[in-house]
Each structure stands twice: as structure tokens, then as C-alpha cells.
Amino acid sequence: MATKHSCEQEFSIGDLVRLKQDEVLSHGIGLILDKRDDSAEIIKDFVKQLGIDPEKDPDMTDALRAADKYLLNTSVYLVHWQGGSTTKNVFRNIWMFYNEIELLSKVSSSKDNNKGETK
């Protein structure tokens, strides 16, 4: 059974992020839109949709086992990405792992602004 990895930085919906080590923001910035914790299940469903039976394909079984051991039990974040000069469309939504991004600005909740009281 795979263990759930802990993120160095926990991101929240509304946080602004950049690609790791992109100090000058040459690849743009992103806004966290959503978070999912079932990335292993997403991959398994995708493999099934491709018509691949992992139990009959030893390479696929090994690949899923190795992936499950590392990133697939971590959270993934849907990031609305803006910027970058390599694409025609500068706006796109991308699912990203926590180790691909780093925080630029943390969203503050109404609870934070009101000293623990939600208003």
C-alpha cells in the first residue's frame, strides 16, 4: 500500500503560483483553481480508457507501481496559467503536481482577516 506524501507547501484555491525556480516569471504565473487528492485513480481510469489492461501488461503494471510510489499519492492542483511566450494561447488550465510550482502569493480568507471569525 502506498503512503500519502506530504507537500512542502500546501496550496489553497486562489493562491498565485509560478513554476519552480522561474525567478523572473518568464513562463508566466498561475492561479490555483482546484485541488484533487485522487490522482492515482485518475491515472488508472485513463489507462483503462485507453483499453490497456495493466494486469496483462507487465510494463504497465511496473509503471503504475513506480508512479504510485512517488507522485500519484500527492495532491494535484488545477492551475489557470497565464503567460509564457512559447504558445499561441497564453491562457490555459493545467493539472500540476506540488513539486512543479511554488507560491507567489497566498490567498487570505475572510477568517484570516477577521481574527478567526468568519463573516
Image (spheres, rainbow, N blue to C red):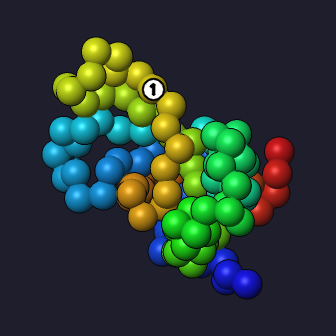
Describe residue 119's horizontal placement relative to residue 34 as left or right. right
Give the residue at x 48% y 61%.
98
Q: Residue furthest front?
A: 56
User: Is residue 81 among the parts visible in the rendering?
Assistant: yes
Give the residue at x 57% y 49%.
77
Q: Determine whether the residue tagged by mark 1 lies in a helix, strand or loop.
A: strand
The part of the image, by quadrant, that contains residue 53 is bottom right
Give the residue at x 59% y 74%.
65
Describe residue 39's horizontal placement relative to residue 19 as left or right. right
**What amino acid is labelled 1 in the image?**
Arg
Q: Residues within 10 Å of mark 1 (few under 14, many from 20)?
A: few
Which of these two is toward me, 72 or 7? 72
Q: Is residue 5 above or below residue 60?
A: below
Give the residue at x 37% y 28%.
82
Which of these two is toward me, 83 or 66? 66
- The residue pinned by badge 1 equals 92
Which of these two is toward me, 70 or 25? 70
Q: Is residue 106 above or below residue 68?
A: above
Percent of width and height locating residue 3: 67, 83
Q: Is residue 47 above or below residue 93?
A: below
Percent of width and height locating residue 5: 59, 78
Describe residue 38's horizontal placement relative to residue 22 as left or right. right
Q: Is residue 74 above or below residue 90?
A: below
User: Is residue 107 among the parts visible in the rendering?
Assistant: no
Q: Which quadrant of the figure contains the C terminus?
A: top right
Describe residue 30's horizontal placement relative to residue 72 as left or right. left
